[in-house]
Image (cartoon, helix red, strand yellow):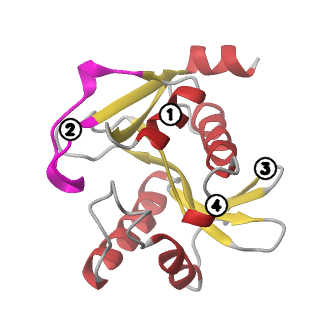
Amino acid sequence: MAEFRHETDRLVLRDWRDEDWPRFWEGTNTPAVMEWLGGVCDDAKRQGAQDRLLGYQRDHGHTFWVVERKEDGAILGFCGLKRCNQEGGPVGEMEVGWRLREDAWGKGYAKEAAIASLDLAFDRFGAEQVVALTVQPNEPSWGLMKRLGMEHRPDLDFANSDFGDDTIIVYSISREDWEGRRG
């Protein structure tokens, strides 16, 4: 299978390479980044996450891809698509997600990468709807979901202890609504 690569104005979304993992974890496995994601990962959790990300690519043709800044090749984090697999959640739905290192916050990188991922979800991977998950206290995450045109779906919210004690809230956008925003 050819390597996945998608470029935006400032970013490259691409498949993972072995040499990416140390830089990714160094930048993102911090208390601030992992605050709403279950806390800093130990070796076993990091390996499990890597295995899942590579498995999504293998099984579905998409994953939460590496986000690389064009300007300097820096690994900023990940953004992309997977099939929702959170127990209690909208399992099987196309899900967009992102995780960027702290010094990349507030610069529009997550939005730029998420827009590219949503375009790919609908145009390349044939999604009819895309969901995004977070916890209520993670206002920057659901704030971006709202800026992307996603709407909170309380009917899909669910309890899951993978990321702490908070209820996981679900946002979604349909193909029709996304095309209306992009058109």
Name the residue that disc number 3 marks.
8
Q: Which mark is residue 167?
A: 2
Mark 1 Cα shell of 10 Å, populated few (<14), some (14-19), many (≥20): few
Name the residue that disc number 4 marks.
104
Q: Judging from the image, what secondary structure is the residue with disc 4 in?
A: helix
Q: Is residue 116 left or right of residue 183?
A: left
Cα–Cα span, label 4 and label 2:
27 Å
Cα–Cα span, label 1 and label 3:
22 Å
Q: Amino acid at mark 2?
A: Thr
Q: Judging from the image, what secondary structure is the residue with disc 3 in?
A: loop
Mark 4 Cα shell of 10 Å, populated few (<14), some (14-19), many (≥20): some
Q: Are marks 1 and 3 in contact (CB under 8 Å)?
A: no
Q: Is residue 37 left or right of residue 151?
A: left
Q: Residue at x 37, y 39 (%)?
A: 133
Q: Amino acid at mark 1?
A: Gly
Magenta part of the chain? 152-168
